[in-house]
Image: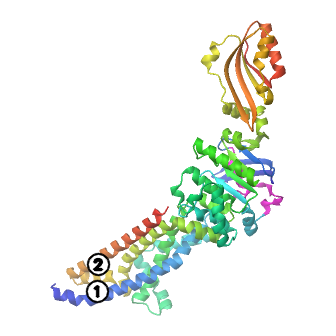
Amino acid sequence: MLKLQNISVTFRGHGKVVHAVKNVSLHVKRGEIFGIIGSSGAGKSTLIRTVNLLEKPEAGEIFVRGEKISALKGTALRKSRQKIGMIFQHFNLVGSKTVHDNIALPLRASGTPENEIRKRVPELLELVELSDKEFSYPGELSGGQKQRVGIARALANNPDIILGDEPTSALDLETTESILHLLADINERLGVTILLITHEMQVVKKICHRVAVMQAGEIVEENEVYELFAHPKHPLTRELVTKSLNLTLPPRIADKVHGALVRLEYLGNSAEESVLSETLRLHWVKINILHGHIEYIHDKPIGILIVGLEGAALQIDNALEFLHGIVAKVEVIRHG
Amino acid sequence: MDSISLVEFLPDLWTATVETGIMLGISLALALVLGLPLGFLLFLTRRGMLLENRALHIIGGLLINFVRSLPFVILLILVIPLSLVVTGRSTGPVAATVPLAIASIAFYARLVETSLCEVNTGLLEASLAMGASTGLIIRQVLLPEALPGLVRGFTVTVISLIGYSAMAGVVGGGGIGFLAINYGYYRYETAVMIVTVILLILLVQAVQSVGDLSANRIEKKK
């Protein structure tokens, strides 16, 4: 659906040269929700803006549905952009126009006749569950409602792909959930491919199928979301995953624990098995559960437990070896 | 001065009002017809804008700055030959319209550009992303978004022009302002001067109120 090949974007000005995007290649498949995560300044916003050529890359090529976007200009580029919807962090609605006119704008851009626009706009509003706001002004809407209008506007010309530029970053937690839900729903029902950028792991976890991690203009890691959470490789990814799973033991508690401090990670089915009781049954150790959490990503669980193991050194070693055999990851935080 | 001479003065006042009307009407119409598009052109040719064109932007900007840096009295005299060519006369209210129009076009164009700069660039980005043409963006995004600013700018232009038109007397343009100078300054007829000044104050107040009211009404819709 979308292919970025060796994209580089460089900003020059005031005697400074900033390489915002460095030789990035990406392939987003039809119908998937692909996320790009990174902190601000990582270049993800610049990267997503190259897809519809709002940012012209210095080098590299962009293909959408096999069409070489990066070679387009003028009317051809406009026609192509009409099939690429975009939603924004700050919604970018025309405040002096009604919701109806805002959603009609892309339809007018594509030359849709007015009588068809009158039929299409209510359809779109129904899709985003905002039917009663057709003749309201954006100023009268909440942030979440504004983003719904933004989504309806992006969908107006039946695009193949929607670009999301931090679509939930200006919203509170609850509204974020509902917007993400809507995006996932649209993806599923209409089969629209979605490429979005975000700095929140929460967004990735909730709706993305695949994700790329971006740092300093480069993609440092790319994987299926579950795999990325289960086996993060790059230090930044690990940091993001750890933070997102929110599993750090308060030092006060860690200090109190005698014996070995161990972090166990279960994936898939083993997360539901009674690993600990088996260990207790077979080995002469005491187990203290200090912290635990099970995260479901696309209905697949990732379980994390932090436990203290007490016992003779040999017994602890045996228990660890046993655990190695059944859980995905055993990480000894501190030896006994 | 007694009441009889004030009555005698009324026909002069009426003529002056008509003259002011002609001068303002024509030059303001031209400010709208030419100054508004010129302001859009200045804005759209800026760097990174829809019609980015450095040369055009600089030339337009210089031209406007040139007109605006001239004291109006100088402009008035400078364009006498042009007035002669355009209107066939070098004096009178119609001839005085030429420098007034030039001044108001330049003045308004700059104010138009300024209000367009206030429009959220995110809106332009969104419009570009949806594949809208420049014409559609102007009609559906820039114009409605900048409208309150455009109305306020026009109000300022009208008021400045009322002031400028007083100087049009230099080329025999006449008008209310000139009447005030003529009677009050040259003939020491204070009462007439006060009447004309009051008339000018009322005129400016009325223009400002109408301008504010319309701008607020447009803004309220948001």
Percent position (x, y) of residue A240? 69, 34
Observer able to see residue A63: yes
Which picture quadrant has residue B51? bottom right
Tell me if residue A168 comes above or below residue A292 in the rendering: below
For badge 2, the amino acid type reads Leu
Label 1 crowding class (10 Å Cα cut-off): few <14, some 14-19, many 20+? Answer: many
Asked whether, in this view, residue B20 is left or right of residue A148, the answer is left
Q: Is residue A43 magenta?
A: yes
Residue annotated with mark 1: B13
Using the image, tell me which numbered label, if any, was put on residue A13. Answer: none
Magenta range is: A42-71
- Check the picture and name the quadrant holding the N terminus of chain A: bottom right
The answer as to whether the residues below labels 2 and 1 share one chain is yes
Q: Is residue B78 magenta?
A: no
Q: Chain of mark 2?
A: B
Residue annotated with mark 2: B199
Q: Chain of mark 1?
A: B
Asked whether, in this view, residue A133 is left or right of residue B185, the answer is right
Which picture quadrant has residue A285? top right
Q: Earlier in the sequence, mark 2 or mark 1?
A: 1
For badge 1, the amino acid type reads Leu
Percent position (x, y) of residue A101? 59, 65
Tell me if residue B102 comes above or below residue A216 in the rendering: below
Give B115 or A213, whichever is nearer the viewer.
A213
